[in-house]
Amino acid sequence: MAGTSNSLLTTPSEWIDYQLIDSGNGEKLERFGSITLIRPEPNANWPKSLSGEEWHQRHHARFVARSSTQGEWVKKSKTNPSDWQITYQVGPIDIKFRLALTKFKHVGIFPEQAANWQYIAASLRKMKSQTPKVLNLFAYTGGASLVARACGADVTHVDSIKQVVSWANQNQELSGLKDIRWVVEDAFKFVKRETKRGNGYHGIILDPPAYGHGPKGERWKLEDQIEEMIEQVITLLDPKEHFFILNTYTSGFSSENIEKLIKTHYPQVRNLETGDLYLRPSGKHSTGKEKLIMSNYGRFRKIL
Ligand SMILES: C[S@@+](CC[C@H](N)C(=O)[O-])C[C@H]1O[C@@H](n2cnc3c(N)ncnc32)[C@H](O)[C@@H]1O
């Protein structure tokens, strides 16, 4: 048999500084450390469990959408910060993230990715290679890069936006880590160059958006380029031991698409897992059934 696969729903667990408190009526109420936010969430198409009054009392700021790409943060009190920190623990290391109320509802972290960070840490801990090499593409503020570095990997972080890469660098400093290789480049261009150079990696993570741009205006359109990207990036995997994660928030690109894509370009794949990452509300009020699906993923590993 070429490989096994199963469909999994997975959610972050045991994260003190992050909590989905409630969701419903197209919104979510989340606590990031000491700050609680209300953000639009189109997938939350059920009634809220907590009352409107409780949402109001608990929150510090709310993102009010004005259109599908525009909106603004409204703080309950002017003294509530626009910039703060949270921690994510990887073994003995406390990774720190600077969070901020940025334009279009983002805060500098995608908390559901913690389910993939656990996979990265577990894979790296099992590897025999002394210093495994990890490549993080479309890497944003560096969650996966920091986790891999905290586990001792030699990490290359690629993103096309300079400000986002310097934000990731701030997170590295706050976390007391060093030596992540920062690359501001078009991810596809970088991969093509690495293929030509014959470089290899023990771990590769990709979280491509539906649309994006390289720093020189190179156009990224997932639908058109993902086949070639996966075909090339798979060749960078160390043949002896490796892990691989493809995640996407692109609607219409399902975990079945991811499975097919991986099996097509890596027919000998083993231990393939595909499914959805979700957030689950914690707290007494929750029925536990309101699983907020956030993204699709496919991942596999080969460990000696
Ligand atoms: C969905 S975010 C990734 C989230 C990240 N995995 C995390 O969990 O923190 C997509 C990222 O891709 C970057 N990006 C978009 N187009 C790109 C391109 N052509 N090359 C490299 N990075 C790109 C964006 O700047 C953004 O940071």
Image (spheres, rainbow, N blue to C red):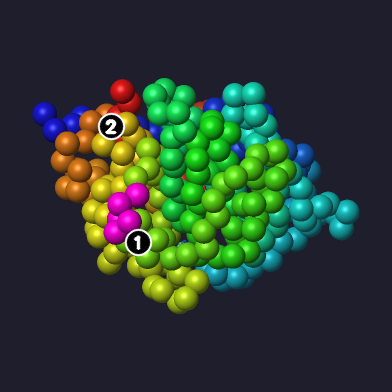
Residue 25's mark? none
Element carrying mark 1: helix
Q: Position of residue 6 (x, y in %)?
A: 26, 31
Of the two numbered discs 1 and 2 on the same chain, state the one appearing first in sequence.
1
The residue lying at 17 percent from left, 36 percent from top is 268
Please identify the quarter of the rendering in which residue 124 is found. Answer: top left
Q: Does residue 6 appear in this view? A: no
Q: Residues within 10 Å of mark 2 (few under 14, many from 20)?
A: few
Q: Position of residue 175 (x, y in %)?
A: 69, 39
Q: Is residue 193 left or right of 5 when viewed as pictured? A: right
Front residue of 70 and 128: 128
Q: CA distance from mark 1 to mark 2?
A: 22 Å
Majority SS type along the magenta span: helix
Front residue of 70 and 98: 98
Residue flagged by tag 1: what amino acid is it? Answer: Arg
Q: Identify the residue under disc 1.
A: 193
Element carrying mark 2: loop
